[in-house]
Image (cartoon, rainbow, N blue to C red):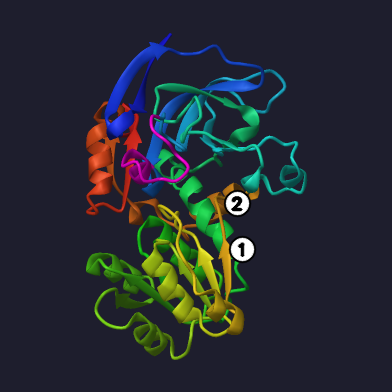
């Protein structure tokens, strides 16, 4: 059977390819496309700026679909709505054996360099990387499970945020979801930093103090907003400037969580880190259990899809969708099946 799927080529060109759907291997399910989100990883990869996603590739790691065929012996049935856990762990390395599948030593990543991606009419996924969407969740709600799992995992990797003074740098989709998780976890005072006044308006409506980047000394502004230094800073941008700002905001004794994917190496003031006992922690993706917790937050109404998803495009309009996501005018852009438009 011929399928259409999105391909991002050298130079960031986007094409819709028509090709035969491969034969499913052992334990692979055949999934029919319902939706796939476009995130910062996709934008930076298309621009050739992602350190771990070389061009060309088949995009679509925020993938939601319906089961067409599933291997015998699984609990999946045709018609089940599923979302992909794109961290394709090996299950054999020391980290996998410790349950740390997000830092598998032999990781492949569905939708960012793997042979299959979720921006396709049909695609194949081993059933162990599929999460059955709970009954009652719509396709659009399900499309937020993967993006929400990353902030849930990031907050888990930080010290306990309850009652603490926290700064979030960057108020894109991930930054806003980090803020939502912080509020749910009982954060004390929280300030959000961004260049875009409209994004800051959203953060303010979510209960945060806001600081427009580039309007003064961020360290002074942050301490004024919190009334103290930050116990924890979530850097959801991860440039040289934002990491340096985060370290100053967390000085002394604070923790910096690097959530955003940097485009390249950055430098740190190591004498300051050592002398002032500042900790920097990396956090990446999620564990399978984070999908269940994300689905629970969405089901309970803590996270509302309409607060994040602002535009939907058909699969054939992938280039327009990527351009819209890059424009900065959207919150979250999805490619969706015709039935979801």
131 is higher (above) or lower (below) than 225: above
> According to the image, label 2 marks what residue?
290
Task: Please report the residue visible at 55 percent of the width from the left and 85 percent of the height from the top.
Answer: 252
Residue ID at (54%, 29%): 80
On residue 90, which mark appears? none
- Of marks 1 and 2, which one's residue comes earlier in the chain? 1
Depth-wise, is mark 1 or mark 2 nearer the camera?
Answer: 1
* Residue 261 in which image quadrant: bottom left
Choose between 264 and 187: the one closer to the eye: 264
- Residue 153, quarter of the rendered image: bottom right
Magenta segment: does it hold 207? Answer: no
Q: Is residue 312 left or right of residue 272?
A: left
SS under mark 1: helix
Coordinates of residue 246 in the picture (x, y in percent): 45, 74
Dot 2 surroundings within 10 Å: few (below 14), some, or many (20 or more)?
many
- Is residue 210 shown to the viewer in this render? yes
Can residue 169 be seen in this snapshot? no
Quadrant placement of the N terminus = top left
Q: In which quadrant will I find the C terminus?
A: top left
Residue 106 position in % (x across, y down) = 65, 37
Q: Name above or below for residue 53 compared with residue 28.
A: below
Q: Which residues are magenta?
A: 42-56
Give the percent coordinates (x, y) of residue 279: 59, 73
| Residue found at the very far front of the displayed protein | 271
Q: Main secondary structure of the magenta part?
A: loop
Q: Which residue is mark 1?
A: 156
> Element type at marker 2?
helix
Asked if the stretch drawn in magenta spans residue 55, the answer is yes
Q: Residue at x 35, y 72 (%)?
A: 193
Please say if the residues under marks 1 and 2 sit with CB atoms less than 8 Å apart: yes
Q: Left or right? Give the position of 325 relative to 70.
A: left
Alpha carbon separation for disc pair 1 and 2: 10 Å
């Amino acid at each position: 059977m011929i399928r259409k799927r999105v391909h991002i080529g050298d130079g960031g060109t986007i094409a819709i390819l028509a090709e035969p759907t491969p034969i499913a291997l052992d334990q692979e399910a055949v999934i029919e496309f319902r939706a796939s989100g476009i995130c910062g990883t996709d934008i930076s990869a298309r621009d050739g700026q992602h350190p771990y996603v070389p061009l060309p590739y088949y995009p679509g790691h925020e993938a939601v679909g319906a089961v067409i065929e599933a291997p015998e012996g699984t609990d999946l049935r045709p018609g089940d709505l599923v979302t992909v856990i794109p961290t394709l762990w090996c299950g054999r390395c020391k980290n996998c054996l410790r349950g740390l599948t997000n830092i598998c030593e032999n990781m492949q990543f569905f939708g960012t360099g793997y042979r299959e991606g979720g921006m396709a009419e049909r695609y194949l996924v081993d059933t162990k990387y599929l999460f059955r969407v709970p009954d009652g969740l719509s396709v659009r709600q399900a499309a937020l499970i993967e993006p929400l799992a990353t902030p849930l995992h990031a907050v888990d990797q930080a010290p306990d945020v309850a009652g603490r003074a926290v700064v979030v740098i960057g108020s894109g989709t991930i930054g806003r979801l980090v803020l939502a998780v912080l509020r749910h976890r009982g954060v004390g005072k929280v300030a959000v930093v961004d260049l875009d006044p409209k994004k800051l308006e959203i953060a303010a409506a979510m209960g945060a103090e806001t600081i427009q980047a580039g309007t003064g000394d961020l360290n002074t502004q942050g301490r004024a907003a919190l009334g103290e230094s930050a116990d924890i800073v979530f850097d959801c941008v991860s440039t040289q400037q934002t990491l340096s700002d985060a370290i100053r905001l967390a000085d002394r004794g604070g923790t910096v969580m690097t959530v955003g994917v940097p485009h390249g190496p950055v430098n740190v003031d190591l004498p300051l880190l050592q002398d002032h006992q500042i900790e920097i922690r990396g956090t990446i993706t999620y564990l399978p259990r984070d999908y269940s917790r994300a689905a629970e937050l969405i089901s309970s109404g803590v996270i509302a899809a309409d607060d994040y998803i602002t535009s939907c495009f058909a699969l054939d309009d992938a280039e327009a969708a990527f351009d819209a996501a890059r424009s900065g005018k959207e919150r979250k852009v999805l490619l969706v099946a015709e039935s979801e438009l």
